[in-house]
Image (cartoon, rainbow, N blue to C red):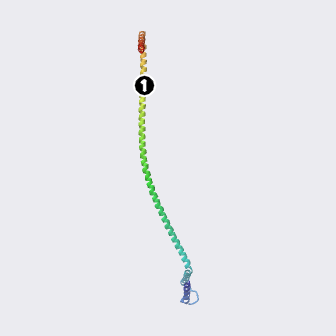
Amino acid sequence: MGERIKSTMDLLIYLQNSHLATGFGFNTNLFETNLINLAVVIGVLVYFGKGVLTTLLNNRKETIVNTIRDAEERYQEATEKLNKAYTRLEQAKAKAEEIRVNGLAQMEIEKQELIKAADEDSKRLEDSKNATLRFEEQRAIEQVRQQVSRLALELALETLKTRLNRDLHAQMIDYHIGLLQSMESVID
């Protein structure tokens, strides 16, 4: 600090001894007065403001360094998160592929089971149809048989009514009585 005072004093002594300070009066040359004023202001700022300016610059430097460091840390964290996300994405893709393959296999199994069940149902329906057809055929045959029997009986009764007279009726009764007697003798 003592050196600054000495340099300021030297400047003032120089200005007194220089040809600029030859007399007392107003200097109307604006350019010269502005240079002197500017030199004085810069000297005062350097002398008194050097510490403040240095502190401000150091603080600004620390702020910038901290900001850069924080940005680098956030970048590293973001990179790590991105890598983890890529890893999870790959795992998810692998899991999705596994699920797809398992789904296709399960779908094929279920398809085969459905085909088998449909074949069994078809066979059961075919058997049921055949049984129903046989039943209906038997029923139709039985109905035809009953109808033929009824018609034959009606025809026989009609024939008997038209052809049966008293003599033929007596012969038939005698014939059947004889049959019954012969059956009775066989049984005894």
Q: Residue at x 47, y 60 (%)?
A: 84
Q: Compared with residue 116, is residue 55 higher up or lower down, i.e. above or below?
A: below
Query: Which kind of residue does numbered mark 1 sit on?
Result: Glu
Count all numbered tags in the image, as a single digit. 1
Q: Compared with residue 80, is residue 160 higher up or lower down, i.e. above or below?
A: above
Q: Compared with residue 92, is residue 157 higher up or lower down, i.e. above or below?
A: above
* Quadrant assignment, res 125: top left
Q: Position of residue 143 (x, y in %)?
A: 43, 25
Along the viewing direction, whichever of 150 and 90 lies nearer the viewer? 90
Q: Residue at x 51, y 71 (%)?
A: 65
Along the viewing direction, whichever of 33 and 151 lies nearer the viewer? 151
Residue at the extreme front: 188
**If the image is split into quadrants, where does the N terminus sit?**
bottom right
Residue matched to label 1: 142
Q: Compared with residue 60, is residue 113 higher up or lower down, i.e. above or below?
A: above
Q: Position of residue 76 (x, y in %)?
A: 48, 65
Q: Secondary structure at mark 1?
A: helix
Dot 1, crowdedness within 10 Å: few (<14), some or many (≥20)? few
Q: Is residue 164 visible?
A: no
Q: Residue at x 42, y 38 (%)?
A: 120
Q: Residue at x 42, y 25 (%)?
A: 142
**If the image is split into quadrants, where does the C terminus sit?**
top left
Q: Position of residue 180 (x, y in %)?
A: 42, 13
Q: Position of residue 97 (x, y in %)?
A: 43, 53
Q: Is residue 54 visible?
A: yes
Residue at the extreme top: 167
